Protein backbone atom coordinates (compact mmCIF):
# COMPACT_ATOMS: atom_id res chain seq x y z
CA UNK A 1 0.00 0.00 0.00
CA UNK A 2 1.30 3.45 -0.94
CA UNK A 3 1.77 5.82 1.98
CA UNK A 4 3.42 9.15 2.67
CA UNK A 5 6.85 9.00 4.27
CA UNK A 6 5.47 10.39 7.53
CA UNK A 7 2.80 7.69 7.56
CA UNK A 8 5.41 5.00 6.88
CA UNK A 9 7.35 6.31 9.89
CA UNK A 10 4.36 6.10 12.22
CA UNK A 11 3.27 2.69 10.95
CA UNK A 12 6.80 1.38 11.44
CA UNK A 13 6.89 2.73 14.99
CA UNK A 14 3.60 0.98 15.72
CA UNK A 15 4.95 -2.26 14.20
CA UNK A 16 7.81 -2.04 16.68
CA UNK A 17 5.42 -1.94 19.61
CA UNK A 18 5.79 1.78 20.22
CA UNK A 19 2.76 3.09 22.10
CA UNK A 20 4.17 6.35 23.47
CA UNK A 21 6.43 9.01 21.97
CA UNK A 22 7.67 12.34 23.29
CA UNK A 23 8.41 15.49 21.37
CA UNK A 24 7.66 19.00 20.21
CA UNK A 25 6.30 19.98 16.77
CA UNK A 26 7.70 22.47 14.28
CA UNK A 27 7.80 23.37 10.62
CA UNK A 28 10.10 20.56 9.50
CA UNK A 29 7.99 17.82 11.13
CA UNK A 30 4.48 19.01 10.22
CA UNK A 31 3.83 15.91 8.11
CA UNK A 32 4.94 13.65 10.95
CA UNK A 33 2.64 15.42 13.40
CA UNK A 34 -0.21 15.21 10.90
CA UNK A 35 0.34 11.46 10.76
CA UNK A 36 0.43 11.33 14.56
CA UNK A 37 -2.90 13.19 14.64
CA UNK A 38 -4.46 10.64 12.28
CA UNK A 39 -3.15 7.78 14.43
CA UNK A 40 -3.83 9.27 17.85
CA UNK A 41 -5.91 6.23 18.80
CA UNK A 42 -2.93 3.92 18.18
CA UNK A 43 0.04 5.88 19.47
CA UNK A 44 0.20 8.49 22.22
CA UNK A 45 2.26 11.66 21.90
CA UNK A 46 3.38 13.63 24.95
CA UNK A 47 4.37 17.18 24.19
CA UNK A 48 7.00 18.66 26.48
CA UNK A 49 7.79 22.27 27.35
CA UNK A 50 11.26 21.99 25.77
CA UNK A 51 12.84 19.40 23.50
CA UNK A 52 15.47 18.57 26.12
CA UNK A 53 12.65 17.60 28.47
CA UNK A 54 11.21 15.36 25.76
CA UNK A 55 14.56 13.63 25.26
CA UNK A 56 14.93 13.01 28.99
CA UNK A 57 11.35 11.72 29.07
CA UNK A 58 12.08 9.21 26.31
CA UNK A 59 15.22 8.25 28.25
CA UNK A 60 13.31 7.79 31.52
CA UNK A 61 10.66 5.76 29.70
CA UNK A 62 13.35 3.44 28.32
CA UNK A 63 15.14 3.03 31.66
CA UNK A 64 11.92 2.21 33.48
CA UNK A 65 10.78 -0.40 30.94
CA UNK A 66 13.77 -1.65 28.96
CA UNK A 67 11.91 -0.67 25.78
CA UNK A 68 13.39 1.74 23.25
CA UNK A 69 12.30 5.32 23.93
CA UNK A 70 11.27 7.59 21.05
CA UNK A 71 11.60 11.36 20.81
CA UNK A 72 10.68 13.66 17.92
CA UNK A 73 11.87 17.21 17.22
CA UNK A 74 11.88 19.66 14.38
CA UNK A 75 14.97 20.92 12.57
CA UNK A 76 17.47 23.55 13.73
CA UNK A 77 16.99 24.53 17.39
CA UNK A 78 14.50 21.73 17.93
CA UNK A 79 17.12 19.20 16.94
CA UNK A 80 19.97 20.84 18.83
CA UNK A 81 17.84 20.98 21.97
CA UNK A 82 17.89 17.18 21.95
CA UNK A 83 21.67 16.95 22.11
CA UNK A 84 22.10 16.90 25.90
CA UNK A 85 19.37 14.27 26.22
CA UNK A 86 20.92 12.12 23.52
CA UNK A 87 24.36 12.38 25.16
CA UNK A 88 22.84 11.47 28.53
CA UNK A 89 21.34 8.31 27.02
CA UNK A 90 24.59 7.47 25.23
CA UNK A 91 26.76 7.63 28.34
CA UNK A 92 24.31 5.43 30.28
CA UNK A 93 23.62 2.91 27.49
CA UNK A 94 19.92 3.73 27.12
CA UNK A 95 18.08 2.58 23.96
CA UNK A 96 16.54 5.56 22.22
CA UNK A 97 15.52 6.54 18.70
CA UNK A 98 15.60 10.28 18.10
CA UNK A 99 13.70 11.42 15.02
CA UNK A 100 14.36 14.88 13.66
CA UNK A 101 12.97 16.74 10.71
CA UNK A 102 15.13 18.76 8.38
CA UNK A 103 14.74 21.14 5.46
CA UNK A 104 13.99 19.55 2.06
CA UNK A 105 16.96 17.77 0.50
CA UNK A 106 17.50 20.41 -2.23
CA UNK A 107 17.92 23.07 0.49
CA UNK A 108 20.40 21.16 2.65
CA UNK A 109 23.78 22.85 2.74
CA UNK A 110 22.40 26.24 1.73
CA UNK A 111 22.03 27.74 5.24
CA UNK A 112 18.29 27.43 4.94
CA UNK A 113 15.95 28.57 7.71
CA UNK A 114 16.30 26.28 10.72
CA UNK A 115 18.80 24.06 8.95
CA UNK A 116 21.51 22.33 10.97
CA UNK A 117 23.67 19.25 10.44
CA UNK A 118 22.24 17.34 13.36
CA UNK A 119 23.72 14.07 12.12
CA UNK A 120 27.19 15.60 12.23
CA UNK A 121 26.57 17.20 15.60
CA UNK A 122 25.40 13.95 17.21
CA UNK A 123 27.83 11.56 15.56
CA UNK A 124 30.05 11.25 18.68
CA UNK A 125 27.08 10.66 21.00
CA UNK A 126 25.02 8.09 19.07
CA UNK A 127 25.60 4.45 18.24
CA UNK A 128 24.71 5.36 14.67
CA UNK A 129 22.75 8.01 12.83
CA UNK A 130 21.08 8.42 9.48
CA UNK A 131 20.04 11.12 7.05
CA UNK A 132 17.23 9.68 4.92
CA UNK A 133 18.00 10.68 1.36
CA UNK A 134 15.55 8.44 -0.46
CA UNK A 135 11.94 7.64 0.42
CA UNK A 136 12.62 4.02 -0.54
CA UNK A 137 15.11 3.74 2.35
CA UNK A 138 12.90 5.19 5.07
CA UNK A 139 11.19 2.04 6.36
CA UNK A 140 14.41 0.02 6.35
CA UNK A 141 16.30 2.80 8.16
CA UNK A 142 13.70 3.06 10.92
CA UNK A 143 13.81 -0.72 11.40
CA UNK A 144 17.62 -0.63 11.51
CA UNK A 145 17.55 2.25 14.00
CA UNK A 146 15.53 0.15 16.46
CA UNK A 147 17.75 -2.87 15.85
CA UNK A 148 20.94 -0.92 16.55
CA UNK A 149 19.52 0.95 19.55
CA UNK A 150 18.55 -2.27 21.35
CA UNK A 151 21.31 -4.66 20.24
CA UNK A 152 24.32 -5.46 22.39
CA UNK A 153 25.16 -2.51 24.58
CA UNK A 154 22.09 -0.29 24.01
CA UNK A 155 22.25 3.37 23.07
CA UNK A 156 20.66 6.17 21.05
CA UNK A 157 20.28 6.27 17.26
CA UNK A 158 19.27 9.43 15.39
CA UNK A 159 17.24 9.47 12.17
CA UNK A 160 17.09 12.80 10.33
CA UNK A 161 14.21 12.94 7.84
CA UNK A 162 14.14 15.87 5.37
CA UNK A 163 10.73 17.45 4.90
CA UNK A 164 10.27 16.35 1.29
CA UNK A 165 10.89 12.70 2.25
CA UNK A 166 8.06 12.93 4.78
CA UNK A 167 5.66 14.04 2.05
CA UNK A 168 6.63 11.66 -0.75
CA UNK A 169 4.66 8.49 -1.45
CA UNK A 170 6.08 4.95 -1.36
CA UNK A 171 5.05 1.37 -0.78
CA UNK A 172 4.80 0.41 2.89
CA UNK A 173 6.00 -3.16 3.43
CA UNK A 174 4.85 -3.70 7.00
CA UNK A 175 7.70 -2.34 9.12
CA UNK A 176 8.54 -5.74 10.63
CA UNK A 177 11.12 -5.51 13.44
CA UNK A 178 14.54 -6.93 12.61
CA UNK A 179 16.17 -9.50 14.89
CA UNK A 180 18.78 -8.04 17.22
CA UNK A 181 22.41 -8.56 16.33
CA UNK A 182 23.90 -11.77 17.72
CA UNK A 183 26.03 -11.47 20.84
CA UNK A 184 29.38 -13.16 21.39
CA UNK A 185 29.15 -16.38 23.38
CA UNK A 186 32.19 -17.14 25.53
CA UNK A 187 33.55 -20.67 25.49
CA UNK A 188 33.59 -23.03 28.46
CA UNK A 189 37.35 -22.66 28.49
CA UNK A 190 37.07 -18.89 28.99
CA UNK A 191 34.53 -19.29 31.77
CA UNK A 192 36.49 -22.03 33.51
CA UNK A 193 39.48 -19.68 33.74
CA UNK A 194 37.26 -17.18 35.55
CA UNK A 195 35.83 -19.88 37.79
CA UNK A 196 39.32 -21.00 38.78
CA UNK A 197 40.22 -17.54 40.06
CA UNK A 198 36.92 -17.24 41.96
CA UNK A 199 37.29 -20.68 43.52
CA UNK A 200 40.67 -19.74 44.95
CA UNK A 201 39.50 -16.38 46.36
CA UNK A 202 39.37 -15.84 50.10
CA UNK A 203 37.88 -12.33 49.90
CA UNK A 204 35.76 -12.19 46.71
CA UNK A 205 33.84 -9.00 45.96
CA UNK A 206 31.22 -8.56 43.23
CA UNK A 207 31.12 -5.12 41.63
CA UNK A 208 27.77 -4.94 39.80
CA UNK A 209 26.91 -2.20 37.34
CA UNK A 210 24.22 -0.91 35.03
CA UNK A 211 24.76 -3.83 32.68
CA UNK A 212 23.06 -6.09 35.22
CA UNK A 213 19.98 -3.86 35.20
CA UNK A 214 19.95 -3.46 31.42
CA UNK A 215 20.18 -7.22 30.85
CA UNK A 216 17.51 -7.98 33.48
CA UNK A 217 19.97 -10.27 35.25
CA UNK A 218 19.27 -9.52 38.92
CA UNK A 219 18.07 -13.07 39.63
CA UNK A 220 21.12 -14.59 37.94
CA UNK A 221 23.44 -12.24 39.83
CA UNK A 222 22.00 -13.21 43.21
CA UNK A 223 22.22 -16.94 42.50
CA UNK A 224 25.87 -16.49 41.53
CA UNK A 225 26.66 -14.32 44.57
CA UNK A 226 24.98 -16.69 47.01
CA UNK A 227 26.86 -19.70 45.67
CA UNK A 228 30.29 -18.09 46.07
CA UNK A 229 29.18 -16.23 49.23
CA UNK A 230 30.46 -12.88 47.96
CA UNK A 231 29.31 -9.43 49.09
CA UNK A 232 28.00 -7.17 46.35
CA UNK A 233 28.86 -3.52 45.86
CA UNK A 234 27.24 -1.57 43.05
CA UNK A 235 28.11 1.27 40.78
CA UNK A 236 25.53 4.03 40.94
CA UNK A 237 23.94 2.74 37.73
CA UNK A 238 23.78 -0.78 39.15
CA UNK A 239 22.05 0.05 42.43
CA UNK A 240 18.57 -1.29 41.73
CA UNK A 241 20.01 -4.59 40.45
CA UNK A 242 20.36 -5.81 44.04
CA UNK A 243 17.66 -5.82 46.70
CA UNK A 244 19.15 -3.68 49.45
CA UNK A 245 17.57 -5.95 52.07
CA UNK A 246 19.69 -8.91 50.98
CA UNK A 247 22.49 -9.58 53.52
CA UNK A 248 25.07 -9.68 50.70
CA UNK A 249 24.15 -6.18 49.50
CA UNK A 250 26.61 -3.49 50.55
CA UNK A 251 25.25 -0.65 48.41
CA UNK A 252 27.08 1.82 46.22
CA UNK A 253 30.85 1.85 46.07
CA UNK A 254 33.27 4.47 44.75
CA UNK A 255 33.96 8.13 45.41
CA UNK A 256 30.70 8.72 47.27
CA UNK A 257 29.95 5.10 48.03
CA UNK A 258 28.83 3.63 51.33
CA UNK A 259 31.57 3.11 53.87
CA UNK A 260 31.39 -0.69 54.13
CA UNK A 261 31.01 -1.16 50.38
CA UNK A 262 34.09 0.89 49.51
CA UNK A 263 36.20 -0.46 52.37
CA UNK A 264 35.44 -4.08 51.49
CA UNK A 265 36.24 -3.46 47.85
CA UNK A 266 39.54 -1.89 48.91
CA UNK A 267 40.74 -5.06 50.68
CA UNK A 268 39.22 -7.73 48.40
CA UNK A 269 41.60 -10.24 46.81
CA UNK A 270 39.31 -10.71 43.78
CA UNK A 271 36.99 -8.08 42.29
CA UNK A 272 34.42 -9.49 39.86
CA UNK A 273 33.23 -6.57 37.74
CA UNK A 274 29.92 -7.37 36.04
CA UNK A 275 28.46 -4.86 33.57
CA UNK A 276 30.64 -1.98 34.79
CA UNK A 277 33.05 0.47 33.18
CA UNK A 278 35.52 0.82 36.07
CA UNK A 279 35.21 4.60 35.68
CA UNK A 280 37.46 7.06 37.49
CA UNK A 281 34.75 7.73 40.10
CA UNK A 282 34.74 4.03 40.94
CA UNK A 283 38.47 3.33 41.02
CA UNK A 284 40.29 6.47 42.14
CA UNK A 285 44.03 5.67 42.31
CA UNK A 286 44.34 2.89 39.73
CA UNK A 287 47.65 1.60 41.07
CA UNK A 288 46.27 1.21 44.58
CA UNK A 289 42.99 -0.19 43.21
CA UNK A 290 44.73 -3.12 41.52
CA UNK A 291 47.41 -3.79 44.14
CA UNK A 292 47.15 -7.32 45.52
CA UNK A 293 43.79 -7.72 43.78
CA UNK A 294 42.83 -9.89 40.82
CA UNK A 295 40.36 -8.20 38.47
CA UNK A 296 37.73 -10.17 36.56
CA UNK A 297 35.73 -8.17 34.02
CA UNK A 298 32.49 -9.44 32.49
CA UNK A 299 30.85 -7.11 29.99
CA UNK A 300 28.89 -7.02 26.76
CA UNK A 301 31.13 -4.36 25.18
CA UNK A 302 34.69 -5.43 24.31
CA UNK A 303 35.67 -1.76 24.10
CA UNK A 304 35.37 -1.53 27.89
CA UNK A 305 37.75 -4.40 28.57
CA UNK A 306 41.10 -3.11 29.86
CA UNK A 307 40.13 0.47 28.97
CA UNK A 308 40.31 1.84 32.50
CA UNK A 309 41.57 -1.07 34.58
CA UNK A 310 43.69 -3.99 33.38
CA UNK A 311 41.91 -7.27 34.01
CA UNK A 312 43.49 -10.56 34.99
CA UNK A 313 40.70 -12.36 33.22
CA UNK A 314 37.74 -11.16 31.14
CA UNK A 315 34.68 -12.49 29.39
CA UNK A 316 32.69 -10.71 26.68
CA UNK A 317 29.01 -11.43 26.14
CA UNK A 318 25.49 -11.31 27.53
CA UNK A 319 25.50 -11.31 31.34
CA UNK A 320 22.15 -13.12 31.42
CA UNK A 321 23.74 -15.98 29.50
CA UNK A 322 27.14 -15.90 31.19
CA UNK A 323 26.15 -15.85 34.87
CA UNK A 324 24.14 -19.11 34.94
CA UNK A 325 26.96 -20.92 33.15
CA UNK A 326 29.54 -19.46 35.50
CA UNK A 327 27.39 -20.33 38.51
CA UNK A 328 27.44 -23.97 37.41
CA UNK A 329 31.24 -23.94 37.28
CA UNK A 330 32.10 -22.27 40.59
CA UNK A 331 32.23 -24.14 43.89
CA UNK A 332 29.96 -23.54 46.85
CA UNK A 333 31.95 -21.34 49.21
CA UNK A 334 31.55 -19.82 52.67
CA UNK A 335 33.53 -16.78 53.83
CA UNK A 336 32.53 -16.22 57.46
CA UNK A 337 35.51 -14.04 58.41
CA UNK A 338 35.08 -11.94 55.26
CA UNK A 339 31.46 -11.19 56.10
CA UNK A 340 32.35 -10.53 59.70
CA UNK A 341 34.56 -7.69 58.48
CA UNK A 342 31.63 -6.27 56.50
CA UNK A 343 29.49 -6.27 59.64
CA UNK A 344 32.20 -4.38 61.52
CA UNK A 345 32.37 -1.75 58.77
CA UNK A 346 28.58 -1.41 58.74
CA UNK A 347 28.45 -0.97 62.52
CA UNK A 348 31.13 1.72 62.38
CA UNK A 349 29.27 3.57 59.62
CA UNK A 350 25.94 3.34 61.48
CA UNK A 351 27.46 5.13 64.47
CA UNK A 352 29.67 7.52 62.51
CA UNK A 353 27.20 8.85 59.97
CA UNK A 354 23.82 8.68 61.69
CA UNK A 355 22.33 12.06 62.62
CA UNK A 356 18.96 13.10 63.92
CA UNK A 357 16.94 16.02 62.62
CA UNK A 358 15.81 17.28 59.23
CA UNK A 359 18.82 15.86 57.41
CA UNK A 360 18.97 14.60 53.82
CA UNK A 361 19.14 10.96 54.88
CA UNK A 362 16.11 11.31 57.16
CA UNK A 363 14.14 13.12 54.45
CA UNK A 364 14.92 10.22 52.10
CA UNK A 365 13.85 7.65 54.68
CA UNK A 366 10.55 9.47 55.29
CA UNK A 367 9.81 9.51 51.55
CA UNK A 368 10.44 5.76 51.44
CA UNK A 369 7.76 5.32 54.13
CA UNK A 370 5.18 6.55 51.62
CA UNK A 371 6.56 4.87 48.49
CA UNK A 372 6.22 1.21 47.57
CA UNK A 373 9.10 -1.14 46.64
CA UNK A 374 8.38 -0.69 42.94
CA UNK A 375 7.95 3.10 43.01
CA UNK A 376 10.34 4.58 40.45
CA UNK A 377 12.81 6.96 42.08
CA UNK A 378 14.48 9.56 39.88
CA UNK A 379 17.22 12.04 40.71
CA UNK A 380 18.87 15.00 39.14
CA UNK A 381 22.62 15.42 39.65
CA UNK A 382 24.50 16.67 42.69
CA UNK A 383 24.58 16.05 46.43
CA UNK A 384 20.95 14.94 46.53
CA UNK A 385 21.78 12.27 43.94
CA UNK A 386 24.54 10.84 46.12
CA UNK A 387 22.41 10.98 49.29
CA UNK A 388 19.68 9.01 47.51
CA UNK A 389 22.24 6.51 46.19
CA UNK A 390 23.62 6.08 49.71
CA UNK A 391 20.41 5.99 51.73
CA UNK A 392 17.41 4.92 49.63
CA UNK A 393 16.67 1.19 50.13
CA UNK A 394 16.10 0.03 46.55
CA UNK A 395 14.41 -3.34 46.23
CA UNK A 396 13.26 -3.60 42.61
CA UNK A 397 15.24 -3.51 39.33
CA UNK A 398 14.71 -0.40 37.19
CA UNK A 399 13.37 1.54 40.18
CA UNK A 400 16.31 4.00 40.23
CA UNK A 401 16.80 6.39 37.32
CA UNK A 402 19.67 8.85 37.33
CA UNK A 403 22.19 10.42 34.97
CA UNK A 404 25.44 8.64 35.77
CA UNK A 405 27.94 8.96 32.94
CA UNK A 406 27.16 12.50 31.78
CA UNK A 407 25.94 13.85 35.13
CA UNK A 408 23.17 15.94 33.58
CA UNK A 409 21.66 18.55 35.86
CA UNK A 410 18.09 19.11 34.65
CA UNK A 411 17.58 15.43 33.79
CA UNK A 412 15.11 14.79 36.58
CA UNK A 413 11.68 16.24 35.78
CA UNK A 414 11.71 15.03 32.18
CA UNK A 415 12.88 11.56 33.20
CA UNK A 416 10.26 11.38 35.96
CA UNK A 417 7.58 12.32 33.44
CA UNK A 418 8.75 9.59 31.07
CA UNK A 419 8.91 6.99 33.82
CA UNK A 420 5.40 7.87 34.97
CA UNK A 421 4.08 7.44 31.43
CA UNK A 422 5.94 4.12 31.14
CA UNK A 423 4.26 2.82 34.27
CA UNK A 424 0.73 3.83 33.26
CA UNK A 425 0.85 7.29 34.85
CA UNK A 426 2.06 5.80 38.13
CA UNK A 427 3.25 7.80 41.11
CA UNK A 428 6.92 8.63 40.52
CA UNK A 429 9.28 10.41 42.91
CA UNK A 430 11.98 12.87 41.88
CA UNK A 431 14.66 13.94 44.32
CA UNK A 432 16.34 17.11 43.11
CA UNK A 433 18.34 20.06 44.33
CA UNK A 434 17.42 23.71 43.89
CA UNK A 435 20.27 24.07 41.39
CA UNK A 436 19.23 21.15 39.19
CA UNK A 437 15.52 21.92 39.47
CA UNK A 438 15.96 25.44 38.13
CA UNK A 439 17.49 24.09 34.93
CA UNK A 440 14.33 22.38 33.61
CA UNK A 441 11.61 23.24 36.11
CA UNK A 442 9.38 24.18 33.17
CA UNK A 443 8.73 20.47 32.66
CA UNK A 444 6.39 20.60 35.65
CA UNK A 445 4.07 22.09 33.07
CA UNK A 446 4.37 18.88 31.07
CA UNK A 447 3.45 16.78 34.11
CA UNK A 448 0.39 18.95 34.79
CA UNK A 449 -0.72 18.98 31.16
CA UNK A 450 -0.62 15.18 30.87
CA UNK A 451 -1.81 14.35 34.38
CA UNK A 452 1.41 12.70 35.51
CA UNK A 453 1.40 12.38 39.32
CA UNK A 454 5.08 12.96 39.94
CA UNK A 455 6.22 14.03 43.42
CA UNK A 456 9.21 16.38 43.32
CA UNK A 457 11.19 16.55 46.56
CA UNK A 458 13.62 19.48 46.49
CA UNK A 459 16.57 19.25 48.88
CA UNK A 460 17.00 23.00 48.96
CA UNK A 461 20.24 24.24 50.49
CA UNK A 462 20.38 27.50 48.54
CA UNK A 463 23.72 26.54 46.97
CA UNK A 464 25.22 24.36 44.27
CA UNK A 465 25.94 21.78 46.94
CA UNK A 466 28.37 19.36 45.32
CA UNK A 467 30.50 22.07 43.76
CA UNK A 468 30.44 23.96 47.07
CA UNK A 469 31.54 20.82 48.90
CA UNK A 470 34.54 20.47 46.58
CA UNK A 471 35.32 24.18 46.97
CA UNK A 472 35.30 23.71 50.72
CA UNK A 473 37.46 20.60 50.71
CA UNK A 474 39.92 21.38 47.92
CA UNK A 475 39.75 25.17 47.28
CA UNK A 476 40.11 26.58 50.80
CA UNK A 477 36.44 27.57 51.11
CA UNK A 478 36.50 29.92 48.11
CA UNK A 479 32.82 29.61 47.22
CA UNK A 480 32.93 31.05 43.73
CA UNK A 481 29.44 31.38 42.19
CA UNK A 482 27.95 28.50 44.18
CA UNK A 483 25.87 30.48 46.70
CA UNK A 484 22.58 30.97 44.88
CA UNK A 485 19.91 31.75 47.51
CA UNK A 486 17.39 32.34 44.76
CA UNK A 487 14.21 33.87 46.13
CA UNK A 488 12.04 31.39 44.23
CA UNK A 489 8.78 30.65 46.02
CA UNK A 490 8.37 26.98 45.11
CA UNK A 491 4.85 26.76 46.47
CA UNK A 492 3.64 29.65 44.32
CA UNK A 493 5.64 28.29 41.37
CA UNK A 494 3.97 24.88 41.62
CA UNK A 495 0.53 26.40 42.00
CA UNK A 496 1.11 28.75 39.06
CA UNK A 497 1.81 25.71 36.88
CA UNK A 498 -1.25 23.87 38.20
CA UNK A 499 0.59 21.54 40.57
CA UNK A 500 0.38 21.28 44.35
CA UNK A 501 3.08 23.09 46.31
CA UNK A 502 4.34 22.45 49.84
CA UNK A 503 6.94 24.00 52.13
CA UNK A 504 8.63 21.57 54.55
CA UNK A 505 11.03 22.79 57.20
CA UNK A 506 10.74 19.75 59.43
CA UNK A 507 9.79 16.08 59.48
CA UNK A 508 6.19 16.64 60.54
CA UNK A 509 5.52 19.10 57.70
CA UNK A 510 7.18 16.72 55.23
CA UNK A 511 4.96 13.84 56.30
CA UNK A 512 1.84 15.99 55.85
CA UNK A 513 2.99 17.04 52.37
CA UNK A 514 3.81 13.47 51.36
CA UNK A 515 0.52 12.11 52.73
CA UNK A 516 -1.41 14.61 50.62
CA UNK A 517 0.81 14.16 47.56
CA UNK A 518 0.59 10.37 47.55
CA UNK A 519 -3.18 10.44 47.96
CA UNK A 520 -3.61 12.79 45.00
CA UNK A 521 -3.27 12.36 41.23
CA UNK A 522 -1.91 15.88 40.95
CA UNK A 523 1.83 16.60 40.42
CA UNK A 524 3.39 17.98 43.58
CA UNK A 525 6.47 19.99 44.50
CA UNK A 526 7.78 19.77 48.08
CA UNK A 527 10.45 22.26 49.11
CA UNK A 528 12.62 20.81 51.89
CA UNK A 529 14.93 23.43 53.37
CA UNK A 530 18.26 21.98 54.54
CA UNK A 531 21.55 23.45 55.71
CA UNK A 532 23.97 24.74 53.06
CA UNK A 533 26.90 22.99 54.71
CA UNK A 534 25.46 19.47 54.54
CA UNK A 535 28.08 17.19 52.97
CA UNK A 536 28.06 13.87 51.21
CA UNK A 537 30.20 11.60 53.36
CA UNK A 538 32.12 9.41 53.21
CA UNK A 539 34.09 10.64 50.21
CA UNK A 540 37.21 9.37 48.46
CA UNK A 541 39.06 12.39 47.00
CA UNK A 542 39.55 12.32 43.22
CA UNK A 543 42.54 10.23 42.21
CA UNK A 544 42.99 8.88 45.74
CA UNK A 545 42.37 5.46 47.26
CA UNK A 546 40.10 4.00 49.96
CA UNK A 547 42.82 4.65 52.54
CA UNK A 548 42.37 8.40 51.87
CA UNK A 549 38.61 8.31 52.54
CA UNK A 550 37.18 11.46 54.17
CA UNK A 551 34.75 10.61 56.96
CA UNK A 552 34.45 13.95 58.79
Image: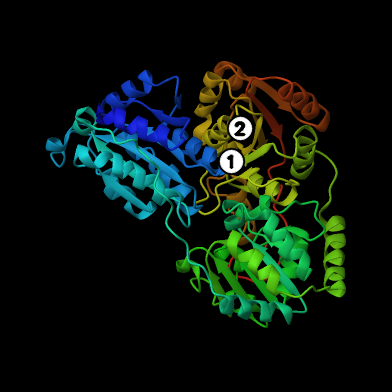
Can residue 538 be seen here? Answer: no
Please state the horizontal and vertical placement of residue 307, each as a whole percent of the image.
48, 71
Q: Which residue is mark 2?
A: 423
Please state the horizontal and vertical placement of residue 438, each as a whole percent of the image.
53, 34
Residue 268 against residue 152 in the figure, above or below = below
**The C terminus - image quarter:** bottom right
Can residue 331 be seen here? Answer: yes
- Secondary structure under the numbered disc 1 in the rendered image: helix
Q: Nearer the viewer, residue 3 or 335?
A: 3
Mark 1 packing: few (<14 Cα in 10 Å), some, or many (20+)? many
Instruction: Please report contact status of discs 2 and 1: CB closer than 8 Å, yes or no.
Output: yes
The label shown at residue 64 is: 1
Please state the horizontal and vertical placement of residue 65, each as a whole percent of the image.
57, 41
The residues bearing labels 2 and 1 have C-alpha atoms spaced at a distance of 8 Å
Side (left or right) of 410 relative to 102: right
Which of the 4 quarters of the picture holds residue 413? Answer: top right
Which of the 4 quarters of the picture holds residue 362? Answer: top right
Mark 2 packing: few (<14 Cα in 10 Å), some, or many (20+)? some
Q: Nearer the viewer, residue 335 or 331?
A: 331
- Residue at x-position 62% and y-position 38%: 432
- Residue at x-position 57% and y-position 57%: 211
**The N terminus - image quarter:** top left
Q: Nearer the viewer, residue 18 or 339?
A: 18
Please state the horizontal and vertical placement of residue 303, each as a whole percent of the image.
45, 67
- Residue at x-position 38% and y-position 51%: 126
Side (left or right) of 524 relative to 415: right
Q: Nearer the viewer, residue 317 or 512?
A: 317
The label shown at residue 357 is: none
- Residue at x-position 83% and y-position 61%: 346
Residue 476 against residue 451 in the figure, above or below = below
Coloration mode: rainbow
Amino acid sequence: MQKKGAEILIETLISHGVTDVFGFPGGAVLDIYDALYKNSGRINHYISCHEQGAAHAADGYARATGKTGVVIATSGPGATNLVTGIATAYLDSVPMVAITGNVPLPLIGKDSFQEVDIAGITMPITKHNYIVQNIGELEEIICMAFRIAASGRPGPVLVDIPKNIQAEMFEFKGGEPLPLFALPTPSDTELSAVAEIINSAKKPYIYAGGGVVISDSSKELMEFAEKIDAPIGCSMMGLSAVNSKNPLALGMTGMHGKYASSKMKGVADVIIGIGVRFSDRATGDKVAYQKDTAIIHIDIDDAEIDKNISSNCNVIGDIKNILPRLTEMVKVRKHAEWHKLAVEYKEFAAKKFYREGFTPENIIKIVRDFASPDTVIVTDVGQHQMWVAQHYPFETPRSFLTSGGLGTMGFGVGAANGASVAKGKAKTVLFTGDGSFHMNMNEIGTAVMHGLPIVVVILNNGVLGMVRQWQGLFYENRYSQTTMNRPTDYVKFAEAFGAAGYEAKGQAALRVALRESFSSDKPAVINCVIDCDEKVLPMIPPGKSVSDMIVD
